[in-house]
Image (tube, rainbow, N blue to C red):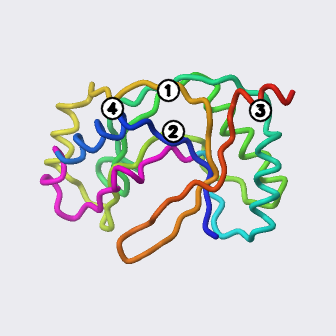
Amino acid sequence: MRTFIAIDLPDPVRAALAKAQESFRGLCSDARWTRPEGIHLTLKFLGEISGAQVAQVSEVLLKAGSFAPFSVEIAGFGFFPSAKRPRVFWTGVAASHALTELAASIETQMEKLGFAREERGFSPHLTLARFKDPRPQPELSSAVAAAAASLFGKFEVSEFFLFESKLSAHGAQYGKVMSFQLAKIMNRG
């Protein structure tokens, strides 16, 4: 099963992101827009794993450390690697140090299970669109500059999930395999 670890979004944030995507959609015909129901905050991509590995991952995540719930704010836009050669169009995630600590803890624990450590530093974002051909998108860039102060909501993160990703001709379909409550992790000591 193809898996990743992520934070899900509340419906109001998802709706605000869908509205923003719709406003930008006509500005670049070659973008592949992420379906709003599939937008999530990835903490760690695992890839293909077996049923036995799902059990191992779940057990380790239950012991990932003690983290209290924390708030995140979804705001602004950007491009990876840059606006001149965009491959990904994203909205930003501003959070307390707790988000970075949670991602680092998960990274360390997954490395102990044999998953490769991510070479790039953790950069929290939500992918809105991808570009097959990394070329400038001047109309989108102009619209993004005008909407730079956009705020899509703030919410408290009290859990994260192990997700399964099923690829199909219509794009990836995501399903939650298991949830991990931050308060419960904290109580486990």
For label 1, the residue is 72
Taking the spot 85% from the left edge, 30% from the top edge, the residue there is 188
- Quadrant including the N terminus: bottom right
Taking the spot 75% from the left edge, 69% from the top edge, the residue there is 51
For label 2, the residue is 124
Q: Secondary structure at mark 2?
A: loop
- Quadrant including the C terminus: top right
Please determine whether, in this image, residue 12 is positioned above or below residue 44.
above
Please determine whether, in this image, residue 168 is positioned above or below residue 70.
below
**Gap in Å between the C-alphas at discs 2 and 4?**
12 Å
Disc number placed over residue 185 in the picture, else none: 3
**Gap in Å between the C-alphas at discs 3 and 1?**
19 Å
First of labels 2, 1 by sequence position: 1
Residue at the extreme bottom of the image, as rendered: 169
First of labels 3, 1 by sequence position: 1
Looking at numbered disc 4 in the image, what kind of residue is underneath it? Gly
Q: Secondary structure at mark 1?
A: strand
**Gap in Å between the C-alphas at discs 3 and 2?**
22 Å
